[in-house]
Amino acid sequence: MLNIKLICLGKMKEQYLIEAFSEYSKRMSAYCKLEVDELPEERLPPGPSAAQVSAALSREGAAISRRIPPGYFSIALCIEGRACSSEQFAAFLADCSNRGASRLCFIIGSSNGLDEALKTSADERLSLSQMTLPHHLARVMLAEQLYRALSLNAGGKYHK
Amino acid sequence: MLNIKLICLGKMKEQYLIEAFSEYSKRMSAYCKLEVDELPEERLPPGPSAAQVSAALSREGAAISRRIPPGYFSIALCIEGRACSSEQFAAFLADCSNRGASRLCFIIGSSNGLDEALKTSADERLSLSQMTLPHHLARVMLAEQLYRALSLNAGGKYHK
């Protein structure tokens, strides 16, 4: 069974996102061991400078790095990452299992994105869409895609 | 001001999706006149044949066609449609306004997708992701992208 750790930043405020994520997480749990590690977002003053944003991203990146457990294959979510179909994503997860790489760590950044150094050091970069998603909606969408991929790999019906 | 009609199929059952869509629709309404036309999904027996699915899609396609108002620019959402960034989507909406094409009709199919003939006859095909999204989550994501694009075009801060 896959061990999936999700590192993400900031508390979800909207109840509908909390419930959507909770629902898809619950469904996923039939197929994997899921751990969610929610780190605090760095605080920024209103209208921050590029240097302030960059410094905050760097601190967030360092905090994330410390939470990637040794031996985990890390997958950073970013818009410039590899786009794939749901079927290709399912095949990727099946391939990880087959290779014995059953410990995966997905990383979703803060509202300012992800530190460049962290993206570079991740084992894989994945893009959910060419469109910019709010990071909390990305969390919901990732959970939904993970649930579908795992359910598909387990021979379940693929619900659209 | 843009007139946006959204034709979609089937009632949302999950409260979190209903609330997410309602929230983004409300935010959009500051920037456009939004009309949502929710048509019933065709009923299919369990484990339908390809021919039954195709016939259902065809009936749904015909029902959708009747609801696209004359003079509206129709945009069918489908996985093989044109992918674009949020900024390109905003530019597309701004361009529609500038050309006087201020009446847009977005179409989201049922859980089985959209009729091929309808996709072909649409003025544009748009893809939100290479991944297959549940059609009700696609409705939420489209509303969120529309809100962001319209807010960006109105000079608002782009929230990530």
Image (spheres, coloured by chain):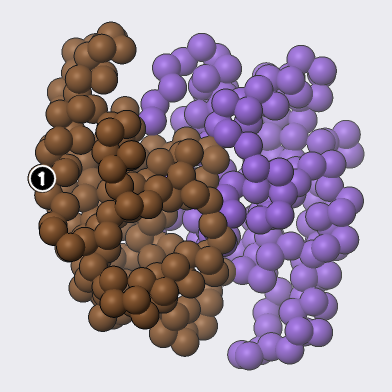
Chain colours: A brown, B purple
- As shown in the figure, which amino acid type bears the numbered disc 1? Arg
- Residue sitting nearer the eye, B3 or A55: A55
| x, y percent for residue A96 | 36, 71
Q: Is residue A145 visible?
A: yes
Under circle 1, the secondary element is helix
On the image, the x and y values in percent for residue A79 come to 46, 39
**Residue pictured at 43% horizontal, 50% vertical:** A126
Quadrant into which the N terminus of chain B falls: top right
Q: Position of residue B84 (x, y in %)?
A: 63, 37
Residue at (42% x, 17% y) in the render: B157
Name the residue: 74% across, 35% down: B104
Instruction: Give the quarter of the image for residue B5.
Output: top right
Residue at image coords 66%, 56% = B79
Using a 10 Å C-alpha cutoff, classify the residue at mark 1 as few (fewer than 14 neighbours), some (14 to 19) or many (20 or more). Answer: few
Q: Is residue B102 above or below residue A158?
A: above
Q: Which residue is mark 1?
A: A66
Q: Is residue B16 left or right of residue B134?
A: left
Question: So how many labels did they put on this image?
Answer: 1
In the displayed structure, would residue A121 be above or below residue B30? below
Residues B114 and A3: in front is A3
On the question of residue B24 being in view, the answer is no
Q: Quadrant of the C terminus of chain B?
A: top left
Residue B25 in the figure: left or right of residue B107: left
Asked whether A95 or B48 is in front, the reply is: A95
Q: Could you tell me which chain the residue with mark 1 belongs to?
A: A
The quadrant in which residue A130 appears is top right
Q: Is residue A24 above or below residue B84?
A: below
